[in-house]
Image (spheres, grey):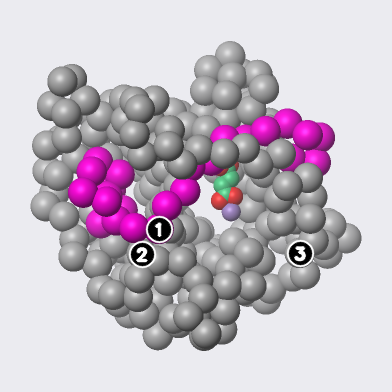
């Protein structure tokens, strides 16, 4: 459970990094499932950055009866997101983010609400939670954020490579005023960030993969109009706390 100080940090900065949310054995099970034939490989596609380098992405909006579903519906994530949004939430989508060694591309500066505004959400009342499966470092393309940018409102986004990129002049002005932070994160940590928090990540220059799992949630009061958007707007039934480890055997088998 987040502490009062962590909630306050999120409210003023638009993000909070929480270490040790998942144990090394749980991260191991998740990593094994990232490469195993199945959900993560089936849904995979490339998103090229401005330089044409691809970052790999697998995305889905159902909470499956599998190890990834166990994380997306984990009380360690969902209850904290409920606290940060001060209301109940539903699953928007989840995704595995893979930056391959040396060739994995960047993510350009954007707000997630830059994408989701177009999905019919009237408010930016969405939260993403990025779980580091490999230690995320500056060298392998960890997330970087503009602290406090969640209070700026939504910027216009255009196309940068195959990605949505925010108006660069305004991003530069925001960084000049608010600064920028590299969120180096140990494996098993969870970075909760607001739908309007500016974030980006650089290419993976290291010789190891940078893998992460991101679960995204929308407030139940913020269901998109016109039947648009991702996920089913129903409350999440959280999984038992040992749910991830229960899938360990299916990995070994
Ligand atoms: C990344 O995987 O580094 C970027 C994630 C995001 O834009 O949400
Ligand atoms: Mn994003």
Q: Image quadrant for the N terminus?
A: bottom left
Q: Image quadrant for the C terminus?
A: top left
Sequence order check, earlier mark of 1 and 3: 1
Mark 1 vs 3: CB contact within 8 A: no
- Give percent across and percent down for residue 223: 44, 81
Q: Residue at x 19, y 40 (%)?
A: 244
Compared with 155, 136 (above or below) is above
Q: Please say whether residue 123 is one of the residues in the magenta stretch.
A: no
Sequence order check, earlier mark of 2 and 3: 2
- Callout in the foreground (1, 2): 1
Identify the magenta region: 49-73
- Callout in the foreground (1, 3): 1
- Give percent across and percent down for residue 113: 60, 68
Q: Check disc 2 and report the residue beneath it.
A: 91
Quick one: SS at disc 1? Answer: loop
Toward the top, the furthest residue is: 207
Question: CA–CA distance between discs 1 and 3?
Answer: 23 Å
Q: Check disc 3 and report the residue beneath it.
A: 157
Q: Residue at x 72, y 61 (%)?
A: 178
Quick one: SS at disc 3? Answer: strand
Horizontal arrangement in the rendering, residue 36 relative to residue 193 (left or right):
left
Quick one: SS at disc 2? Answer: strand
Q: Can residue 77 be seen here?
A: no
Compared with 229, 249 (above or below) is above
Q: Quadrant of ligand 2?
A: bottom right
Question: CA–CA distance between discs 2 and 3?
Answer: 24 Å
Compared with 245, 206 (above or below) is above
Q: Please say whether residue 50 is one of the residues in the magenta stretch.
A: yes
Horizontal arrangement in the rendering, residue 204 relative to residue 84 (left or right):
right
């Amino acid at each position: 459970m987040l502490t009062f100080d962590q909630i306050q940090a999120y409210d003023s900065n638009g993000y909070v990094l929480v270490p040790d949310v998942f144990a090394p054995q749980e991260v191991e099970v998740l990593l094994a499932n990232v490469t195993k034939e199945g959900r993560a490989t089936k849904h995979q596609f490339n998103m090229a950055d401005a330089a044409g380098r691809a970052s790999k992405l697998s995305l889905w909006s159902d909470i499956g009866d599998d190890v990834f579903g166990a994380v997306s519906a984990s009380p360690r994530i969902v209850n904290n997101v409920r606290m940060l949004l001060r209301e109940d939430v539903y699953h928007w989508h989840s995704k595995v983010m893979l930056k391959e060694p040396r060739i994995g591309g960047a993510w350009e500066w954007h707000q997630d609400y830059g994408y989701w505004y177009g999905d019919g959400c009237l408010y930016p009342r969405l939260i993403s939670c990025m779980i580091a499966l490999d230690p995320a470092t500056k060298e392998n393309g960890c997330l970087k954020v503009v602290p406090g940018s969640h209070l700026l409102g939504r910027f216009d986004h255009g196309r940068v490579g195959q990605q949505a990129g925010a108006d660069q002049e305004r991003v530069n002005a925001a960084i000049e005023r608010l600064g920028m932070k590299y969120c180096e994160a140990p494996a098993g940590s969870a970075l909760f960030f607001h739908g309007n928090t500016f974030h980006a990540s650089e290419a993976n220059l290291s010789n190891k993969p940078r893998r992460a799992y991101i679960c995204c949630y929308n407030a139940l009061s913020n269901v998109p109009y016109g039947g648009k958007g991702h996920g089913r707007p129903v409350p999440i039934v959280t999984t038992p706390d040992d749910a991830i480890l229960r899938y360990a055997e299916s990995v070994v088998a």
